[in-house]
């Protein structure tokens, strides 16, 4: 009996991973069998340890046990998986809905928007994590309701309202008037967005550029300058009515082309079906206009985000017509732009097929004469230059889309443009039930100028000097003729935007108006705000041919507006008096009736403020040049290039090719390469048959494997790793 107990203790000690590291046994086996007194003592220690240290069972309702990985790492895995298999239909997204890491990341993002500051994961309170887990379980159990206004699973940290103690009048006002989107709705929207965005970003067409990461209006302008130089006829279409909303069945059918998960589809369908409560306009009109009373300066709370500064509000007013409308479908929130792109992606695919169908190359043309149609144009160093010599031309079309606005370029007769327009009208009628006519899709010639994103596309005829080598080695220089696509900022549209913002009046002779919103700000602060606006305008018109002219005009309007403001504030009667005292760039402190302005002079004397910054770009020579950096064919955003490069290098064949190239160039010695392979062999238990054949040339893997020094080093590392694992479990 005593020997049976000793054998049982010996088996328990040798089979337990907690007491037996893989590198070194705890006790010798022979000594256990021969010395039963030691076995009994060891068994007693085991029983004492298990009685005093009970095994910890993981609680599935404990939020801390559900956060196994970082949310950003989970999102990265989704992006890599979808870009590796972009055409695969996704069938199971509920597993990602269960990942609590995504919900915590969504909570952090919504809190950053709500409170104006990012909240680290270790700063989230335990109660908030429990409420967040309750919200996740409600979504998985189909108990979540969109637009709830009184019953919440989780509340914003900023919301201190006690809804149980509200009066009936306040409750009625909450239920019947327009309210911002609930905090918990935005969390669910963020989770769905993080799940769906990588799926469709891997599938979207390269011709769409709005509501997508890394693709903005500047990208469209660069693509147009690069690829639309040879087109004569243009079709500009406005399909922005699609962004106002579509039939729910059409949206769901567009989603189910790539996503076949019932839980996610039902959640989005519920967001589209649930009505949004809004206040009727008639009730707002009945309210009497009350006289505006004096209001004290409101002090922001500690957790309240600051409002947008004046210069940013002003720049938002310069948004082009194509970027003014942002889709908002039901309770989808930030999902609405993504859903709009999912629906209009069918139009993008249809246009890509038309580009291939209508392509007709001509051998006598010097551009686009390749069957693929993607060959560099005549002059690779000057890609926007298109030669006009030759009677025959290649017929080709191209297409870009920004939101609900499309631009189609046609190289060929006008009849091709008319045929394409007719087919486009029929497609929109059948697919989107959108009734279009010839007036909504006008066909315009390049010589008239095409307005797109507040830039005018027009053609300039240039006569460059062409140098080439004739037969016999003689260099010939002669004048050539060609067309150059010009992308210029619209001065008329800029005046219109300034007038909308009350910066000027009049069309033919614009007269700046004072911006009285900055009346109570200091001269240094006002100049600083306007300099930020001007620097942002310079960046917006970065790719315009008339960048110097348009930015100088904006500087003139802003400088005149500030001069009138300072004239009224410091009682200097006219702009000329302001310029005389404050200089052309308004950098000198302005005077009142007597002496200098006390508010600035005293602070400057005490060293509490810096000197006043003068207005930027007061002269055209100070404006930077237009950015003509070449835009490559097949361009992709930086994050997509990084993903594709990672997927390509993840292939073992490609990785082995890179390694062989490094070895051939002498960047990696054979000894280092062999040691690296042996290390991988021991770490990952790779079989000898999986090692490349280069290892067997003069190096025996078994001899290297049996090296005692390498074994000791590996055993030490394995032992340290096992001890750390045991400490973590204890």
Image (spheres, helix red, strand yellow):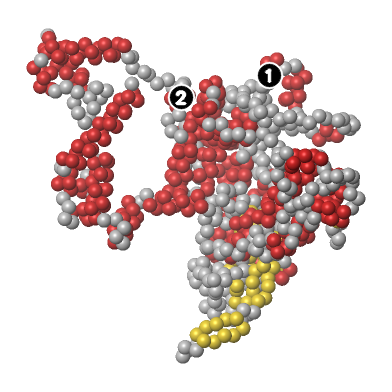
The image shows residue 47, relative to residue 515, as above or below, that is above
The image shows residue 163, relative to residue 573, as above or below, that is above
Can you give x and y, in whole percent of width and height, for residue 236 in the image? 69, 60
Q: Residue at x 14, y 46 (%)?
A: 703
Return the residue nearer the eye: 346 or 162. Answer: 162
Label 1 sits on a secondary structure element that is helix
Q: Residue at x 58, y 65 (%)?
A: 227
Q: Is residue 315 left or right of residue 336?
A: right
Q: How many marks?
A: 2
Which circle marks residue 163 in the picture? Answer: 1
Displayed quadrant of residue 182: top right
> Mark 2 = which residue?
64
Q: Nearer the viewer, mark 2 or mark 1?
A: 2
Can you give x and y, in whole percent of width and height, for residue 40 in the image? 16, 11
Can you give x and y, in whole percent of width and height, for residue 728 in the image? 35, 25
Return the residue nearer the eye: 375 or 64. Answer: 64
Point out the residue furthest to the top here: 1
- Neighbourhood count class around disc 1 (C-alpha, 10 Å): few under 14, some 14–19, many 20 upward: few
Can you give x and y, in whole percent of width and height, for residue 195 in the image? 51, 39
Point out the residue furthest to the left here: 34
Which sits earlier in the primary sequence, circle 2 or circle 1?
2
Return the residue nearer the eye: 537 or 222. Answer: 537
Q: Residue at x 31, y 28 (%)?
A: 725
């Amino acid at each position: 009996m005593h020997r049976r107990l000793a054998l049982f203790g010996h088996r328990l000690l040798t089979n337990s991973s907690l007491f037996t590291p893989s590198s070194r046994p705890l006790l010798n086996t022979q000594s256990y069998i021969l010395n039963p007194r030691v076995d009994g003592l060891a068994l007693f220690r085991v029983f004492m340890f298990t009685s005093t240290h009970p095994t910890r069972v993981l609680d599935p309702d404990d939020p801390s046990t559900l956060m196994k990985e970082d949310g950003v790492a989970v999102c990265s895995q989704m992006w890599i998986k979808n870009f590796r298999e972009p055409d695969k239909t996704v069938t199971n997204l509920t597993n990602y809905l269960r990942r609590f890491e995504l919900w915590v990341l969504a909570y952090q993002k919504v809190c950053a928007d709500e409170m104006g500051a990012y909240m680290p994961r270790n700063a989230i309170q335990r109660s908030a994590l429990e409420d967040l887990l309750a919200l996740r379980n409600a979504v998985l159990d189909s108990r979540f309701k969109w637009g709830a206004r009184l019953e919440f699973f989780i509340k914003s940290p900023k919301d201190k309202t006690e809804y149980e103690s509200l009066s009936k009048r306040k409750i009625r006002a909450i239920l019947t008037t327009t309210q911002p989107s609930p905090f918990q709705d935005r969390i669910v929207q963020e989770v769905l967005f993080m799940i769906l965005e990588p799926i469709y970003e891997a599938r979207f067409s390269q011709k769409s550029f709005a509501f997508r990461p890394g693709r903005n209006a500047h990208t469209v302008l660069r693509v147009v300058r690069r690829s639309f130089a040879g087109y004569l006829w243009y079709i500009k279409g406005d399909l922005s009515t699609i962004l106002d909303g579509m039939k729910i069945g059409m949206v769901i059918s567009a989603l189910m082309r790539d996503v076949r998960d019932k839980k996610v589809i039902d959640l989005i369908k519920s967001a589209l079906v649930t009505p949004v409560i809004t206040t009727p306009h008639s009730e707002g009109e009945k309210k009497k206009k009350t006289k505006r009373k004096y209001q004290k300066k409101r002090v922001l709370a500690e957790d309240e985000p600051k409002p947008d500064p004046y210069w940013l509000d002003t720049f938002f007013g310069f948004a082009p017509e194509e970027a003014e409308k942002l889709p908002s479908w039901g309770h989808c929130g930030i999902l609405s732009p993504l859903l709009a792109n999912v629906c209009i992606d069918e139009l993008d695919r249809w246009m890509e097929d038309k580009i291939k169908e209508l392509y007709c190359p001509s051998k006598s043309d010097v551009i686009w004469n390749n069957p693929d149609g993607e060959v560099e144009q005549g002059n690779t160093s000057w890609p926007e230059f298109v030669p006009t010599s030759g009677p025959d031309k290649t017929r080709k079309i191209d297409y870009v889309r920004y939101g609900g606005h499309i631009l189609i370029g046609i190289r060929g007769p006008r009849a091709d443009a008319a045929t394409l327009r007719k087919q486009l009208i029929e497609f929109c009628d059948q697919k989107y039930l959108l009734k279009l006519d010839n007036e909504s899709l006008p066909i315009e010639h390049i010589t008239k100028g095409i307005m797109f994103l507040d830039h005018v596309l027009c053609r300039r005829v240039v006569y460059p000097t062409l140098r080439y080598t004739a037969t016999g080695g003689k260099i010939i220089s002669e004048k050539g003729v060609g067309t150059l696509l010009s992308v210029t900022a619209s001065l008329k549209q800029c005046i219109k935007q300034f007038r909308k913002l009350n910066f000027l009046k009049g069309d033919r002779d614009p007269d700046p108006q004072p911006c009285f919103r900055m009346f109570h700000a200091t001269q240094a602060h006002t100049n600083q705000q306007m300099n930020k606006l001007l620097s942002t305008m310079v960046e917006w018109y970065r790719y315009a041919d008339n960048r110097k002219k348009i930015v100088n005009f904006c500087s003139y309007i802003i400088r005149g507006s500030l001069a009138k403001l300072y004239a009224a504030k410091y009682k200097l009667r006219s702009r000329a008096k302001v310029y005389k005292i404050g200089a052309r760039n308004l950098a000198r402190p302005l005077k009142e009736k007597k002496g200098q302005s006390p508010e600035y002079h005293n602070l400057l004397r005490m060293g509490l403020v810096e000197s006043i910054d003068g207005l930027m770009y007061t002269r055209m020579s100070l404006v930077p040049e237009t950015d003509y950096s070449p835009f490559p064919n097949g361009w992709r955003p930086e994050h997509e290039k990084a993903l594709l490069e990672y997927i390509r290098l993840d292939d073992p064949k490609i990785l082995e090719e890179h390694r062989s190239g490094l070895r051939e160039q002498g960047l990696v010695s054979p000894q280092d390469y062999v040691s690296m392979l042996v290390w991988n062999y021991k770490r990952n238990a790779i079989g000898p048959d999986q090692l490349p054949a280069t290892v067997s040339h003069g190096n025996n893997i078994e001899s290297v494997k049996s090296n005692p020094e390498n074994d000791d080093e590996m055993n030490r590392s394995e032992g340290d790793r096992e001890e750390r694992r045991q400490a973590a479990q204890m």
